[in-house]
């Protein structure tokens, strides 16, 4: 048989200011009767004491609720409802009242070491904004909802990080289809983390308002290796642009010489010119000019 999940239901409390007036009037009336002894004898004494005790019992049922605060009310262990009203309220004095905050809270998670989709160890941390949505579930379905949120948030972050690679790596260079990564798809990763957290927090009646990564880096044991890889990728990318630009410039130079009939070059001289221009344009150091004072073929 499936266990029934307890859900929040509203409790209609009374206006506390009206009940203050009622309680004070009962006490005042009892004191006056006791002082004046308007009802002589034992019966009058009992009535006076009963009025004073009744007034004190009425005042005992008062409680205060701040904005965005709720009170869980139970009677002899049985859940009676949740009061989300504000200000001075009144309920049966026998009801046990537990106050819960409904305000948004921040959970700044510590840095965790996890393995990404490719098995690389990475350090990751996140900040989660959450609040209690169902007070009955928060109190009765889990033992300690604040500790539950902390543990489940860590579990969700570990699981989410294992579904994504840190970065694209060599996938783009090999022509593979781009896939979401922890470093390159921040918005998508944040949405995935929120969905993971909401699924886990639902049992405690907690709603996730926002979730974002606050720290992301390779673990120290592979950080240097990955840094060299990134440097190599940057050098290759820069060289590719330099070569592409050099080829374009050489092509423009040969086309200009040919169209203007400045000089006629055979294939061998064209090859030599292309080689020299590429060396000059692609070199890391400034090329030293050499002036040819002889003939074209000397």
Image (cartoon, rainbow, N blue to C red):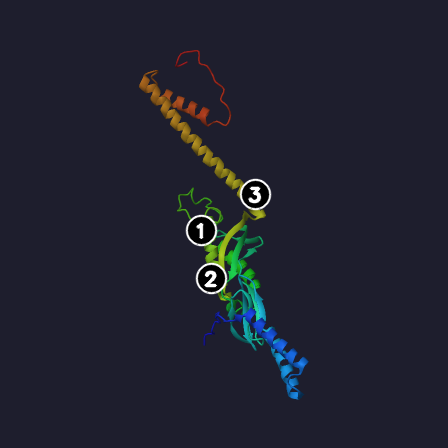
Q: Which residue is mark 1?
A: 188
Tell me the SS state at disc 1. Answer: helix
Percent x, y for residue 240? 43, 34
* Above-or-below relation of 233 to 217: above
Inter-mark Cα distance, 1 to 2: 17 Å
Q: Earlier in the sequence, mark 3 or mark 1?
A: 1
Q: Is residue 143 left or right of residue 249?
A: right
Q: Which residue is mark 2?
A: 199
Q: Earlier in the sequence, mark 1 or mark 2?
A: 1
- Tag 1: Cα neighbours inside 10 Å, few (<14), some, or many (≥20)? few
Percent x, y for residue 53? 63, 79
Q: Are marks 3 and 1 in contact (CB under 8 Å)?
A: no
Q: Nearer the viewer, residue 131 or 96?
A: 96
In this rendering, the label closer to the viewer, 3 or 1: 1
Q: Nearer the viewer, residue 184 or 52?
A: 52
Tell me the SS state at disc 2. Answer: helix
Observer able to see residue 190: yes
Q: Which residue is mark 3?
A: 224
Q: Nearer the viewer, residue 139 or 161?
A: 139
Q: Farthest residue in the right direction?
A: 35
Tell me the SS state at disc 3. Answer: helix
């Amino acid at each position: 048989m499936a266990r029934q999940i307890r859900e929040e239901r509203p409790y209609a409390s009374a206006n506390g200011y009206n009940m203050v007036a009622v309680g004070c009037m009962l006490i005042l009336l009892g004191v006056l009767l006791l002082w004046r002894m308007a009802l002589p004898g034992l019966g009058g004494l009992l009535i006076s004491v009963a009025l004073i005790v009744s007034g004190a019992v009425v005042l005992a049922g008062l409680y205060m609720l701040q904005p965005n605060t709720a009170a869980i009310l139970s009677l002899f262990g049985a859940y009676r409802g949740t009061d989300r009203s504000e200000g001075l309220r009144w309920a049966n004095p026998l009801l046990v009242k537990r106050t819960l905050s409904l305000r948004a809270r921040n959970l700044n998670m510590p840095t965790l070491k996890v393995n990404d989709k490719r098995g690389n160890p990475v350090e990751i941390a996140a900040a989660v904004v959450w609040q209690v949505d169902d007070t009955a579930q928060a109190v009765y379905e889990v033992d300690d909802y604040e500790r539950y949120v902390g543990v489940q948030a860590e579990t969700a972050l570990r699981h989410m990080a294992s579904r994504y690679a840190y970065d694209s790596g060599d996938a783009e260079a090999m022509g593979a289809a781009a896939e979401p990564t922890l470093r390159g798809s921040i918005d998508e990763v944040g949405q995935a983390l929120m969905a993971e957290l909401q699924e886990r927090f639902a049992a405690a009646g907690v709603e996730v308002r926002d979730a974002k990564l606050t720290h992301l880096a390779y673990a120290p044991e592979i950080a240097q290796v990955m840094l060299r890889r990134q440097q190599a990728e940057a050098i290759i990318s820069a060289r590719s642009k330099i070569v592409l630009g050099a080829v374009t410039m050489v092509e423009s130079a040969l086309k200009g010489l040919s169209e203007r009939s400045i000089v006629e070059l055979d294939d061998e001289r064209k090859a030599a010119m292309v080689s020299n221009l590429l060396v000059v344009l692609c070199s890391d150091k400034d090329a030293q000019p050499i002036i040819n004072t002889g003939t074209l073929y000397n």
